[in-house]
Amino acid sequence: MAAETNVVATYYYPTAAPPAGAMEVCSAELGRGGAGDKCFFDDDGRPKRNGTMWTASAHIITAVIGSGVLSLGWAIAQLGWVAGPAVMLLFSLVTYYTSALLADCYRSGDATAGKRNYTYMDAVNANLSGIKVQICGILQYANIVGVAIGYTIAASISMLAIRRANCFHQKGHGNPCTISSTPYMIIFGVAEIFFSQIPDFDQISWLSILAAVMSFTYSSIGLGLGIVQVIANKGVQGSLTGISIGVVTPMDKVWRSLQAFGDIAFAYSYSLILIEIQDTIRAPPPSESTVMKRATVVSVAVTTLFYMLCGCAGYAAFGDAAPGNLLTGFGFYEPFWLLDVANAAIVVHLVGAYQVYCQPLFAFVEKWAARRWPDSAYVTGEVEVPLPLLPARRCKVNLFRATWRTAFVVATTVVSMLLPFFNDVVGFLGALGFWPLTVYFPVEMYVVQKKVPRWSSRWVCLQMLSVGCLLISVAAAAGSIAGIASDLKVYRPFKSY
């Protein structure tokens, strides 16, 4: 027992409901010794969930208010004062509506006592069948890999911006301050290797809350600097229709506008992890879907407000010259220390966002491996490792989890070094994931779950929504691919910029 009292946490996948009398788990296993400190099981035999509307909102805000917020000034610059905010509002409404549909699919059948679907893929498998399930799995996990690459690029750009801001302050704004982003990607990758060892969503609530605070910090700084710049300009920049033909060619105007749609879609993309977040919410009453819908209202409303303010402030400050990343594109040079604080907050936020997004993929591979090799000590066993700062305490580490997650982080970091195109990558990721994961599968699952009659008015409206979003996604993907093709013509891997 002496060794067990020093275990910080254990991680396992219960396969059956607990036997009678096993409605409590030894608090010593969780590193706490009080007699009254007991952990109970939920109706599915898993440790009792403790999530609330606020923790779910924190997870969503961590996932949603990411690096995408900083590209919204550029996106509005391509669309103008009319279309820019209108498109942003449209995406927020679509995201909220389809998220509400998806929340109803967490349990199959009864909303409070039906069988739980623990992941997005579980929900698809319970409601759909055949090739749709396979396509969904490929798209979801490919999108997660893409998001990990995008966040690595964004974090390295922000770390690079801190160095460049200090360089500009010391050597003058005319100095090129050429610095490579590669070392900063490696630093971010090393940090993610460490944090990726946190087993699951239940144990990263603190990281999500910290990341959400950081997102508000840098968004507020960007908003404040934009307002100050508008005052300094003695007026609002920009036009009703966005960047003018003449400044760019007519074809570039089309591609940029389509890419802007992808950037805005990416800024609202979180549906692929909604079910996983919902699985952290405590058992009914009220039902998990009710709590999740409330969390979605809160988080989408808050993010839309911030998006509107930050995007519009960026466009108002710089007009057609709005940078692709408001805090790293150096529309602002001073106060340099405030830019440093904002970019540091971005990095901290992206560390958390990376984990929130990647947990579903981590869990999928680990569950598959546990089913494939149930008797392997490497896959299912654990070893005790002393904590460096607390040698008297030990943490149980699963060797397969440690090596697989480390390999994943290393792979995404290397790809990020090869393709550091922030805006184009963001737009492509948004286009790739928006229609299938945010609209199509939630709509199809809802139709099956609620038995919506074919050709009824509700069914027709849902299909029209799905087709309309498909067209937007295809157009946005085309614009982003054109941007990436243009960047590749002049890009040289690992070169300083």
Image (cartoon, rainbow, N blue to C red):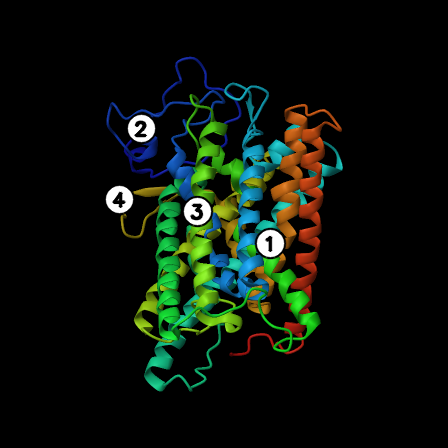
Above or below for 47 versus 387: above
Q: If you read the primary sequence from the N terminus, does the residue marked by circle 4 or circle 2 appear first? A: 2
Mark 4 vs 2: CB contact within 8 A: no
- Identify the residue under disc 4: 392
Q: SS class of the residue under badge 1?
A: helix
Which-is-in-front pick, marks 2 and 1? 1
- Identify the residue under disc 3: 61
Cα distance between the residues tagged 1 and 4? 46 Å
Cα distance between the residues tagged 1 and 3? 17 Å
Above or below for 338 versus 270: below
Cα distance between the residues tagged 2 and 3? 32 Å
Q: SS class of the residue under badge 4?
A: loop
Residue 414 appears in the rendering: no
- Identify the residue under disc 2: 27
- Identify the residue under disc 1: 430
Q: Where is residue 262 shown, x and y percent of the image?
A: 61, 57
